[in-house]
Amino acid sequence: MSYFRLRSRVAASTRLVPVALMGLLLLSSCSKDEDTGMTTPPAPATIAFTQAGLYPEGVQYDAPNSRFLVTSLTTGRVGQVKDDGTYSTAFPDEPRLVSAIGMLLDAPRNRVLVAISDPGANQQRSTAATQGRLARLAIFNNANAAAAPTIVELGSLRPALGHFANDVAVDAQGNAYVTDSFANIIYKVDAQTNTPTVFLEDATRLAPPTGGAFGFNGIVFHPDGYLLVAKSDNGAIYKVPLNNPAGFTQVTTTQNLTAADGMLLQDNNTLQVVSNAQARVFRMASTNGFTSATLSGTFVTPPQFPTTLARRDDASYVLYANLNALFSSQMPAVSQYSINRVDFQ
């Protein structure tokens, strides 16, 4: 989710190629389905979709169903986007899905986990009681799209604090971890019972910013047994051991990662980080288990507020969410969004 202060808002040259060679080139650009022996078209570089008032934030790729899943900050719904740009609702709606933020597709367990919050501005279900004080985890059954989601209350663990559930990670056992941008807490939700607990809380070293700015944001699980967590306000990435969360350390880097939003672990030594305010996706490489990391590539986006990343085959895709238009009284409303392949330079 984005780094901003919450404000309400109303309202090449061409050449001839022999026909035979052209056919060969076309075939080589497609992939072959091993089951049918037929070729399939390559994944598009950009998938544009239109939905008035949607303002998506999270994105994941659901390969078995050939679709991207996207959340909606304004409606709380989880939708699907096909390669032709068709948008439709993916899972049942219900009143407690106030504003859907970060999302994780837990493919081994057929679950889609979504962080639920209430940012207020132009949000259809915002209330005075929940605005800036809501943290929930919604768990959908991806094998039974008609089933109602399980809703886990997180903010009630610290009722006196402001809350904004932002992003989700899942460890090897299926336990979920959710960041809270206003409380700078990481929650843990047990895989078997869905019982929530506070996994990490440190009001001294991880104090949240004041005035509605975000602290904790993106989060990913590393198979070596730790979490990598972004803090938007200072651009820090923290390494949090699962067996000793209080022993967290900051990943050393010289790269400016302020406004860090969604993250994606490309492999055990490569982390991709979206910075929405910088309109960049940074590729960070580590040779020492993320004690430190260095820049190994950058992807520049248009000024359309990139938020989160999804992995499709061997490529990463970033969502252009246009949330700056939602939270600015100086910009017109936006209805078109896009999911774009990341090509690092």
Image (tube, rainbow, N blue to C red):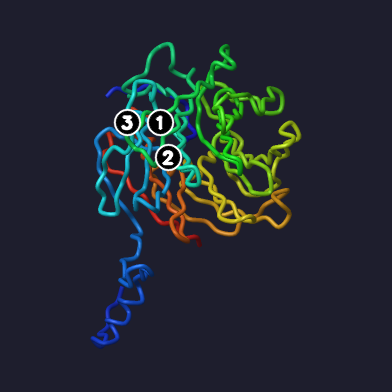
Q: Is residue 140 left or right of 153 when viewed as pictured?
A: left
Q: Residue at x 34, y 71 (%)?
A: 30
Q: In whole angstroms, how far apart are the C-alphas of marks 2 and 1?
A: 8 Å
Residue at image position (29%, 37%) is: 89
Residue placed under numbered mark 3 in the picture: 92
Q: Does residue 331 lie above or below 63 as drawn?
A: above
Q: Give how far across and how far down residue 2 sits, in percent.
A: 47, 35
How many labels were placed on the picture?
3
According to the image, label 2 marks what residue? 58
- Percent from the top left, x then y, of residue 208? 61, 25
In space, the residues marked 1 and 3 are separated at their CA atoms by 13 Å
Q: Are marks 2 and 1 in contact (CB under 8 Å)?
A: yes
Look at discs 3 and 2 and give the one toward the viewer.
3
Judging from the image, what secondary structure is the residue with disc 3 in?
loop
Earlier-in-chain disc, 1 versus 3: 3
Q: Indicate the amino acid at tag 2.
A: Gly
Residue at the spot of label 1 = 100
Which residue is drawn at the image coordinates 26% and 50% (left, top)? 85
From the top left corner, tell me how far across and down residue 178 is, in percent: 55, 32
The residue that appears at 42% across and 22% down in the rendered structure is 118
